[in-house]
Amino acid sequence: MQDHSPADRLWSPATDNKLGYCLYRSMAQPDLDSAGIDKILEKARHRNRTRGLTGCLHYENGMFFQWLEGPWQQVFQLLDILRDDDRHLNMTILDQGTLTERLFEGWEMHFSDPKAASLFDWLADWGNRTDDHQAYVSRVNAFLHSLKAG
Ligand SMILES: Cc1cc2nc3c(=O)[nH]c(=O)nc-3n(C[C@H](O)[C@H](O)[C@H](O)COP(=O)(O)O)c2cc1C
């Protein structure tokens, strides 16, 4: 991983076809149930296959954490679509940058929730250091990437 940028705004690397990633957090729309999440995933996986995107979506305590990776232009375009999706709110970009290789190769959109692993437990074990944004982001990334290993 390289070229980390501040997470406060979207950016584009010099070539849009470069492999990029974005990690964001959002709040699920309160009425969204597991059938609604299944519906999101079904379509997301289909579309990601055609767009060359891979990644991971974790849902816990009414919040989504999603790692998206692929050709930067595709990641960027999907983020615009996601911003308009009212099944979630308050999208916050936590991290973004370029990659030399995919971290979720072959995963059109892995899904996890606390039945598989708890991000909040993972953060609590670490002491919930909300004062250190970069450390928080690294911890969230480490959690998502541990799902791939497991
Ligand atoms: C939390 C969340 C994650 C999503 N992830 C993806 C995704 O990885 N890929 C995708 O194509 N759409 C994803 N979507 C759905 C998009 O917002 C959008 O509904 C869909 O891409 C539009 O498809 P359509 O234009 O064919 O209707 C997600 C939606 C939510 C709420």
Image (cartoon, rainbow, N blue to C red):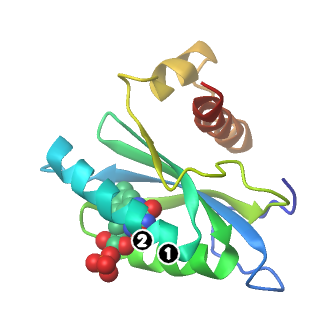
**Where does the image place residue 143, in percent across and percent down from the top left?**
61, 31
In the picture as drawn, the residue positioned furthest to the bottom comes out as 15
Label 1 sits on residue = 50
- Between residue 16 and residue 84, name the one nearer to us: 16
**Where does the image place residue 60, in percent across and percent down from the top left?**
36, 34
The answer to whether the beta carbon of the residue marked 2 is less than 8 Å from any atom of ligand 1 is: yes
Amino acid type assigned to the residue bearing label 2 in the image: Arg
Instruction: Mark 2 and mark 1 in contact? Answer it, CB < 8 Å.
Output: yes
In the picture as drawn, the residue positioned furthest to the left comes out as 31
Please determine whether, in this image, residue 6 is positioned above or below residue 150: below
Q: Quadrant of the C terminus?
A: top right
Label 2 sits on residue = 47
Q: For ligand 1, which image quadrant applies?
A: bottom left
In this rendering, position of residue 105 left or right of residue 115: right
Q: Residues within 10 Å of mark 2 (few under 14, many from 20)?
A: some
Please determine whether, in this image, residue 137 is positioned above or below residue 91: above
**Where does the image place residue 110, in percent across and percent down from the top left?**
48, 45
